[in-house]
Amino acid sequence: MWPTSSRQPPPRTAERTGRVLTVGAPDTSVDADTRWLGPAIGNLLDNALRHGTGTVRPTATVDGSRPRLRVTDEGPGFPPEFLPCAFDRFARAEASRTSEGSGLGLAFVHAVALAHGGTAHAQNAYHGSAVTLDLPC
């Protein structure tokens, strides 16, 4: 599921970073291409572990007839000026550009959501950030 490239670091794990990962999901199914959706969700988890703090919470709910996948963390959240361009290719929240990453992760997540007929949304939550994928059933 993860690309193996000498230029790309391995995905972070909650265990390796000493963080808590809690998952909540109802018993439902989504008609999705797991070859793309799996890495997109993995990207959101990796971002939350890299840039957030505290517990990372991936959740799946059903809103009306649409599955909603959401990853939240307890970090500083997104800089407000970053939110309008969060899903743009090469957009990075860190102005100094000294951390890992190319600025393509959220753009990939957005492309996967669109390819499935869904949407992606980033926002600051009460404590930290939240990225949500709304997908059709």
Image (cartoon, rainbow, N blue to C red):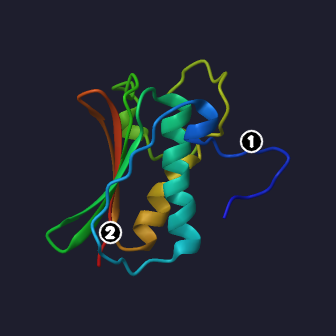
Residue 13, x across and y down, in percent: 60, 42
> Could you tell me which residue is drawn at 81 percent across and 44 percent down?
7
**Up-down: is 114 above or below 93?**
below
Question: Which is nearer the eye, 53 or 107?
Answer: 53
According to the picture, the residue beneath numbered tag 2 turns out to be 135
| Foreground: disc 2 or disc 1 | 1
**Up-down: is 88 above or below 119?**
above
Residue 22, x across and y down, in percent: 39, 45
Q: Secondary structure at mark 1?
A: loop
Where residue 94 sits, quadrant-wise, is top right
> Could you tell me which residue is drawn at 56 percent across and 43 percent down?
46
**Up-down: is 80 above or below 48?**
above
Task: Name the residue type under label 1.
Answer: Pro
Label disc, if present, on residue 9 of the rendered structure: 1
Between the C-alphas of marks 2 and 1, the distance is 29 Å
The earlier-in-sequence mark between 2 and 1 is 1
Task: Name the residue type under label 2.
Answer: Leu
Label disc, if present, on residue 19 of the rendered structure: none
> Could you tell me which residue is drawn at 48 percent across and 38 percent down?
48
Residue 42, x across and y down, in percent: 54, 54
